[in-house]
Amino acid sequence: MVASPVLCPSLALKMALSRVCWARAALWGSAVTHGPYVTRRLQLIRCGLTWGTPGSSKIHLSSKADVKNLVSYVVTKTKMINGKYHQFLSRHFPRFYVLYTVFMKGLQMLWADAKKARRIKSNMWKHNVKFHQLSYREMEHLRQFRRDISKCFFLGIISIPPFANYLVFLLMYLFPRQLLVQHFWTPKQQMEFLDIYHGLRKQSHPEILRCLERVTPLIFDKQLRWNMTDLCTKIRRGTHPATHDILALRECFSHHPLGLNQLHTLQMKAFSRALLLTPYLPPFLLRRRLKTHTTVIHQLDLALAKLGINHLTAQEVKSACYLRGLNSTHLAEERCRTWLGEWLQISCSLKEAELSLLLHNVVLLSTNYTGTRR
Ligand SMILES: *[C@@H]1O[C@H](CO)[C@@H](O)[C@H](O)[C@H]1NC(C)=O
Ligand SMILES: *[C@@H]1O[C@H](CO)[C@@H](O)[C@H](O)[C@H]1NC(C)=O
Ligand SMILES: *[C@@H]1O[C@H](CO)[C@@H](O)[C@H](O)[C@H]1NC(C)=O
């Protein structure tokens, strides 16, 4: 029972690999109608044929027809085999077939993403545009792509021979969440995994709040100290804080004890977990990562404010909220838009020195936001 889904795919995988050879052969044939490269190759073959038989245009013509025939034969044959192969897979290994199609689609999407990222990059070069000057969608694409690529890095290494492809497929089958990027998840898995990741992020919320409460007595200004305590108490009681309550405290976050440069290692580890970054790094690297991460989010926010939240699709709104710490997968779209509006209002009024507040906001603003209240 347990072995069958693993063993059967391994057989089907063998077929998949042999199919890759077929696909390569087919690429040759199917691209003939539009691929300049193949046309050039055909011209070369044709030249070779005419050179071999100087002065005979008859043979030239017939050889051209031959090649055409051959190509169309290969194309139809490959299409047939391809169709049969899909039928075979879907009939005999339905579960594997689903995986297989998801995988192939994922590869295509990843490839499209890579091409788009390259286009954006080359445009940046050509017009001497910096990252923070890009439009929101381009910025977000680059950020997401960088993240995906660094996640794929491990997979790339183990798929280099001699580790062999089978192991990789097996690992991908067993650990899709850890090893694969979103492109390769089924829609059901996407929901499930985002929930799991949010669960992981949420575990560090109480600790971040505790740290905040612990350093509150060190705040010099009496009024601010009082208001910070008030905010923490409210959040503990389950209130979603108002934006002006948070913005009123912005001064505290530009210097000791809450500035980005003064954060304690414990705090930085908790924040790293809350942002799904690895906490197992030396403190100076943790600080640098948190800084770049927060800065990128701040730049995204400014670009998004320029674009306007209303121009985002439902999907974009949800993933923007998720990136900023909200459990947005099950929330109604309107609730997400409202939340993102609040976030932007805070983020866009912050100076660079106060970015630590944005970091805290990942917890302060999201931890008690639900689908119903207010
Ligand atoms: C996210 O929100 C949904 C619905 O509000 C809830 O069922 C789910 O448990 C939440 N996930 C986590 C990890 O808190
Ligand atoms: C509000 O968030 C705090 C901090 O994460 C948590 O301790 C508290 O239980 C939450 N309250 C509600 C009602 O969800
Ligand atoms: C701090 O709290 C007090 C009392 O609730 C309030 O009057 C004051 O406006 C708050 N300060 C700021 C800067 O929001």
Image (cartoon, helix red, strand yellow):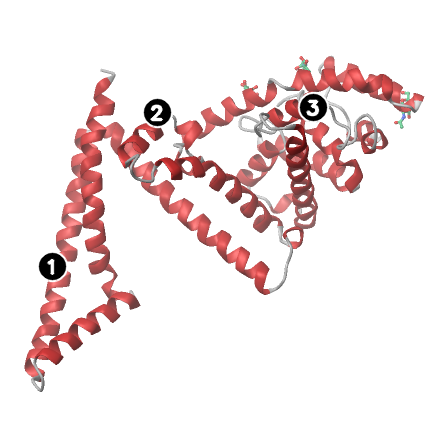
Which residue in the protein does label 2 denote? 174
Contact, CB < 8 Å: mark 2 with mark 3?
no
Q: Nearer the viewer, mark 2 or mark 3?
A: 3
- Ligand 2, by image quadrant, is top right
Q: Secondary structure at mark 1?
A: helix
Report the quarter where the C terminus lies.
top right
Q: Nearer the viewer, mark 3 or mark 1?
A: 3
Graded by Cα atoms within 10 Å as few (under 14), some (14 to 19) or many (20 or more), the crowding at tag 2 reads few
The one of 315 and 49 positioned closer to us in this rendering: 49
Residue 265's disc number: 3
Which residue in the protein does label 1 denote? 73
Left or right: 248 in relation to 361: right
Contact, CB < 8 Å: mark 1 with mark 2?
no
Q: Secondary structure at mark 3?
A: helix
Left or right: 7 in relation to 365: left
Left or right: 311 in relation to 175: right
Does label 1 or label 2 sit earlier along the sequence?
1
The answer to whether the beta carbon of the residue marked 1 is less than 8 Å from any atom of ligand 1 is no
